């Protein structure tokens, strides 16, 4: 029987108590699923697979990240309280937990079709490798963008195997968006990362980091707008687009005030609004 303290440590290790990461993984996946809904019917089981899968995959990513970084986490004020850094959980316990989450993810994947299974396994490798990229790749946010954004492709494949220009544009736009908001996240830890020799786009781009992050964010908006035009979305969608732009302006104010963590979290509303817009269009189109 697991004690309450131990259970709390496992929850913290998987970041279940901090669901922002789940949301930022879930919104791209739901956008991909909704886009597939312009081609074929979306079944409730597919939506449930996307939601549960996002929780499991994000949890796997957090656990393997902390296993990789537990020595570094001990030296960073924001992460010093993590279970592996404090010793609340051992490395062996973390590995067992990771394997359990991995088996749960594979079991869920087996409920899908052969194409989704292949894609899921392919991108699972990216999830495992990502924590290491911070040590040898100057811009690990690009790798994260490819990995997190893949949820759109995987969820899309649940409904259809037809590759369209719309899903390609969405995926590229999502990569730009993810790089953007994770750059803000990296700006929060930039001094610690410099001292520890950890790479990030915040360090790589230096004084231009905020400017580039804003540009990438706008590229995501452009991709959404192009998809709306290509799929003949109604004029109501442009109300959603205006709301998205207002969030962009709010995020700019936060970054001007160097409130980078808040700017990062504001992207939850970006994803949510985009999903609401797509959902309304699927209802209208069908």
Image (spheres, grey):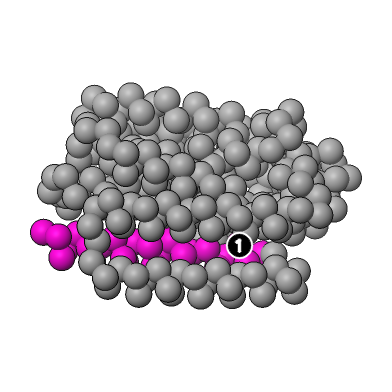
Q: Which residue lies at the image location 37% right of the left edge and 38% below the top edge?
A: 168
Q: Identify whether 148 is placed above or below 184.
A: above
Q: Nearer the viewer, residue 181 or 222?
A: 222
- Asked which quadrant contains residue 64, the reply is top right
Q: Mark 1 falls on what kind of element?
A: helix
Q: Which residue lies at the image location 45% right of the left edge and 30% below the top edge?
A: 124
Span shown in magenta: 261-286
Q: Is residue 12 visible?
A: no
- Asked which quadrant contains residue 114, the reply is top left
Q: Position of residue 227 (x, y in %)?
A: 33, 52
Q: Quick check: 84 left or right of 246?
A: right
Q: Nearer the viewer, residue 204 or 115?
A: 204
Q: Position of residue 15 (x, y in %)?
A: 55, 54
- Asked which quadrant contains residue 68, the reply is top right
Q: Identify whether 27 is placed above or below 241.
A: above
Q: Quick check: 18 left or right of 119?
A: right
């Amino acid at each position: 029987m697991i004690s309450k303290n131990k259970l709390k440590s496992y929850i913290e290790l998987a970041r279940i108590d901090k669901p922002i990461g789940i949301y930022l993984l879930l919104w791209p996946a739901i956008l991909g699923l909704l886009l597939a809904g312009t081609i074929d019917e979306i079944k409730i089981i597919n939506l449930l697979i996307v939601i549960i899968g996002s929780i499991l995959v994000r949890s796997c990513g957090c656990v393997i990240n902390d296993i990789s970084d537990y020595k570094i986490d001990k030296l960073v004020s924001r992460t010093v309280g993590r279970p592996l850094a404090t010793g609340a959980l051992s490395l062996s316990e973390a590995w067992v937990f990771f394997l359990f989450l991995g088996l749960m993810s594979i079991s869920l994947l087996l409920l899908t079709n052969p194409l989704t299974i292949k894609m899921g396994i392919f991108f699972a490798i990216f999830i495992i490798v990502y924590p290491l990229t911070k040590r040898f790749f100057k811009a690990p946010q690009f790798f994260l963008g490819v990995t997190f954004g893949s949820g759109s492709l995987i969820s899309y494949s649940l409904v259809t195997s037809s590759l369209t220009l719309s899903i390609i544009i969405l995926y590229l736009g999502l990569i730009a968006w993810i790089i953007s908001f994770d750059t803000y996240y990296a700006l929060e830890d930039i001094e610690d990362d410099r001292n520890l020799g950890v790479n990030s786009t915040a360090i790589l781009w230096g004084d231009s980091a905020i400017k580039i992050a804003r540009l990438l964010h706008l590229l995501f908006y452009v991709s959404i707008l192009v998809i709306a035009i290509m799929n003949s979305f109604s004029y109501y969608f442009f109300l959603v687009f205006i709301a998205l732009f207002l969030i962009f302006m709010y995020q700019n104010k936060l970054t001007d005030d160097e409130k980078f963590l808040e700017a990062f979290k504001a992207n939850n509303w970006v994803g949510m609004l985009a999903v609401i817009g797509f959902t309304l269009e699927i209802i209208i189109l069908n």
